[in-house]
Amino acid sequence: MPHPTTSPDASATSATHREIRQQPAAWRDLRDLLARQGPALQGFLAPLLAREDLRIVLTGAGTSAFVGDIASEALRRTLRRRVESLATTDLVADPLGVLAEPLPVLLVSFGRSGNSPESSAATRLAEQVAPEVHHLVITCNAEGRLAREHTTAPRSFVLLLPEQTNDTGFAMTSSFSTMLLAVLLAFEPGRAAAVDALAAAATSLLDRAPQIDALLDAEPRRVVYLGSGPLRGLAQESALKLLELTAGRIPAFHDSPLGFRHGPKSIVDDRTLVVVHGSRDPYTARYDADIVAELRQEHPRRVVHLGAEDFPVPGLDGLDDGLRAVALASFAQLLALGASVRLGCTPDNPFPDGSVNRVVQGVRIHELPLR
């Protein structure tokens, strides 16, 4: 990896840098927004959640899908009911398979722009396949197709996030964390009290950007992110951020601490950086500690135990892993931004040739034959 550059994008002039740093303020704006819209939102959700047969499905594509992966794990624990994550890419490709059960569905759709081809197609296919569908749309773009199609729909509620979260940079940063926080608070509004703690935790990470960037001084050839429960979805999102902002020049992988031993661990060498997201759950945390100790014995100084003793994040005590993920995401965003700059990429547009786009291109939606 080249030494740090002095390009303009290395400074705060890039949108990506600004959007990473705006997250604490965006979360506070979200809290204020939910205070205003909360009664209407709860009026929409309450009768649905009273139905024992309701299937709650969280859906999105790419980073938006990882919002669902994290939130579904967290909400299952606290709501003590069925909540699942199903990517729009899977729903669109196999609607009859993934929605095979004849149950009413609350489809929670995430979209930064709301213009991805699969986003609207997933809502339409759910209507076609499931016996009854209600829609909660969480989006950052009032002008997006997803918002426009559902704003006046009779069984839909559109939760439009603060305007600044419609990230203009290539990679989703503040849009990701704010959508994640939004869905957690939508289903559990009493947890809004955690917003200040999350903002303080993220600010502590933002203030340590030089320390995070210094992890790149050893020029890692690849990075692995590990996490369990809700933090496994964060590990996947963290890996994607590095791939996106470095245009794939630094391979990134993700797994759970236990699953990593079953073959994937073979990629670790002295040029591999491993980041283990520390769980708050005392039982799960034992497995985090085990893999950290094992890797450090084999590859000293190549392991970061994020949110634990060696890389603590003040303010997260008492918060569950779903909420912790909101703040911990800043670590991977900063690491990816630093790697992008060092490699001479342009973080706001890592693919100037158009081979990969901010809003996915080239997807053709096929009609589902009636059966």
Image (cartoon, rainbow, N blue to C red):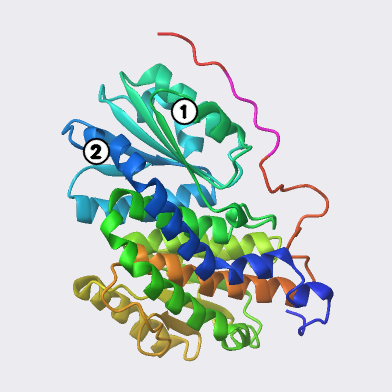
Query: Which is more foreground, mark 1 or mark 2?
Result: 2
- Seen at 60% across and 32% down, the residue is 145
Rendered location of residue 307, percent (x, y): 38, 80
Is residue 365 in view?
Answer: yes
Residue closest to the far top: 371
Against 343, is 217 above or below? below
The residue indicated by pointer 1 is 123
Against 297, is 41 above or below? above
Rendered location of residue 161, percent (x, y): 51, 50
- Quadrant in which residue 165 is drawn: bottom right
- Seen at 74% across and 77% down, the residue is 342
Local secondary structure at mark 2: helix
Rendered location of residue 184, percent (x, y): 35, 54
- Seen at 41% across and 75% down, the residue is 276
Rendered location of residue 280, percent (x, y): 27, 74
The quadrant of the image that shows the N terminus is bottom right
The quadrant of the image that shows the C terminus is top left
Q: Nearer the viewer, residue 270 or 113?
A: 113
The residues colored magenta run: 361-366
- Seen at 62% across and 79% down, the residue is 220
The residue indicated by pointer 2 is 46
Q: Please tell me how many numbered marks the rendered image carries.
A: 2
Is residue 69 in view?
Answer: no
- Quadrant in which residue 15 is drawn: bottom right
